[in-house]
Amino acid sequence: MKTIEYSVRDGIAEISMSRPPANALDEAMLVDLLAALRRAAGDRDTRAVILHSAISGRFCAGLDLKVASAAGAEQLYDVTRKLYIELFDVQFNLGKPSISAVAGAARGGGMTVAVSSDMIVAAESATFGYPEIDSGLLPAIHYVHLPRVVGRQRAFDLLFTGRTFSATEAFSLGLINRVVPDDEVLDAARAIARTLASKPPEAVRRGRAAFMSALDQNYRREIAAAVENFCNVANGEEARERLTAFAERHKPTWKNSG
């Protein structure tokens, strides 16, 4: 069963995620997602890219915790490298604008997928969150990305409480570009994509490359360090206890819980 669908119409590539029930990311899905983005990058006739979900009420749940709980250290590193480093690299070198159309829930690694795009359009009912802390994990690159966007204190709140927040709050924080009615999110993304696709392609390509380079500021190196930290924590006792508890459907026990 395909988890990623790819189509092009009028110079706009659409990449649709479909791994029921919530688009939880495993290695195979990440491989297909990266391949779709590379395909769009290599297609000279593609002028803009839209990333969205085919599952109602779900954008992306992040890493599949059942897969993570069974993964060895090497496999877990491979998966997180694809999500945090390779996804950043392929988006960095995409050569054309990308838009995430978020309808439903985006959590954890799903936030990584969303913010990898140049713009984010969200439905009014969309919700966001970084719940990794509750699984004994780290939000990895979001320690790098989020404070730059929303500021240190607000980033700390979101990353360490793990709370869910609305599209309205995400917009007020500057984390997303637009909030639209639920039934208009994909149409709104397509309208933006058409506007971007109508611009001179060489100017967009060169301008985007300059824009990405100007914003880099050692971002790539910091992401690599974040992946190492994630893997170190994910292979620790707390994370393994929480992941095992998730897979076996029981409450985790923390050694320092008293």
Image: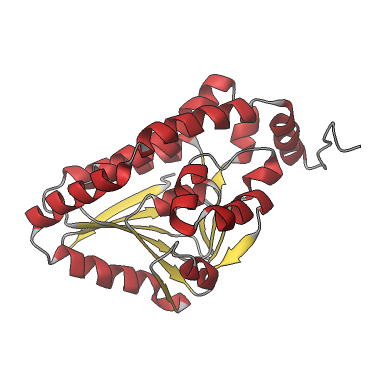
Q: Residue at x 47, y 66 (%)?
A: 103
User: Hey, which residue is sitting farthest right in the picture?
Assistant: 258
User: Hey, which residue is sitting farthest front in the picture?
Assistant: 152
Q: Position of residue 242 (x, y in %)?
A: 73, 37
Q: Position of residue 62 (x, y in %)?
A: 54, 47
Q: Residue at x 45, y 47 (%)?
A: 145
Q: Residue at x 64, y 25 (%)?
A: 235
Horizontal relation, residue 175 to residue 163: left or right: left
Q: Position of residue 227 (x, y in %)?
A: 49, 31
Q: Give above or below for 77 relative to 185.
A: above
Residue 94 picture quarter: top left
Q: Give above or below for 58 relative to 179.
A: above
Q: Residue at x 36, y 69 (%)?
A: 186
Horizontal relation, residue 21 to residue 258: left or right: left
Give the quarter of the figure containing the C terminus: top right
Horizontal relation, residue 43 to residue 106: left or right: left
Residue 158 picture quarter: bottom right
Give the quarter of the figure containing the N terminus: top left
- Front residue of 150 and 161: 150
